Amino acid sequence: MPRLFTGLEIPADVEFALSLKRGGLFGARWIDPENYHITLRFIGDVDGQTADEVASGLDRLSNSLQFPVRLTHLDIFGGDKPRSLFAGVEPSVALTRLQAAHERVLQQIGLAPEGRKFVPHVTLARLRGTAPEDVARFIAEAPRFEALSFVPARFVLFSSRDSVGGGPYLVEQGYPLAA
């Protein structure tokens, strides 16, 4: 039973730049740069028939228009109990529309709505036992975050193995975005 999600791949040059943020934070389990991505919609564990329906439904979104993506800052999820460090994505109408289109297609094939608000980001590390003060210090002392931009050529259907997160993620199918 595959565990699926849709997302945007991160180009190698942006992966490299983000990888330079790694290290120096107690309790951080750093994500391998080749597993960096922006999740559009988590699908979860599905049977083979549903996986085929997902892949087919996403075909309808092929050739959506390309748009720029801009990573602008470091932040955390978890507040007083930090659970992940991420690079935040600048708000974008085009990105929000693409994510909403994924949501509509997946609900049309019978999947439950996503329960969480869409907050586009690239997870850099999973945190365990990391004090909020340590994360705040890490972010404050990090070199200035230079914005990183790219234009994705496609969105993808990823699969992952059942694990505690962080990959490896496999591209099951790619869907081109029109220039």
Image: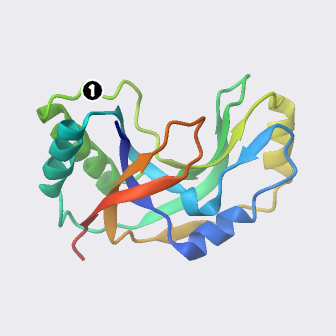
Q: Is residue 65 above or below residue 87?
A: below
Q: Which residue is mark 1?
A: 113
Colour mode? rainbow
Q: Position of residue 42 (x, y in %)?
A: 38, 38
Disc 1 is placed on an element classified as loop
Horizontal arrangement in the rendering, residue 74 relative to residue 128 (left or right):
left
Q: Is residue 73 above or below residue 14?
A: above
The answer to whether residue 66 of the structure is visible from this angle is yes
Q: Residues within 10 Å of mark 1 (few under 14, many from 20)?
A: few
Horizontal arrangement in the rendering, residue 18 relative to residue 94 (left or right):
right
Q: Quadrant of residue 143?
A: bottom right
Classify the position of the N terminus by image quarter.
top left
Q: How many marks?
A: 1
The answer to whether residue 90 of the structure is visible from this angle is no
Classify the position of the C terminus by image quarter.
bottom left
Residue type (three-letter) at the residue carrying disc 1? Pro
Q: Is residue 168 above or below residue 126?
A: below
Residue visible at 40% across and 71% down in the picture: 151
Q: Position of residue 6 (x, y in %)?
A: 35, 49
Residue visible at 68% across and 26% down in the picture: 79
Which one is nearer the viewer's eye here, 26 or 76?
26
Q: Position of residue 129 (x, y in %)?
A: 81, 27
Residue visible at 17% across and 38% down in the picture: 49
Residue visible at 30% across and 46% down in the picture: 99
Q: Position of residue 176 (x, y in %)?
A: 25, 69
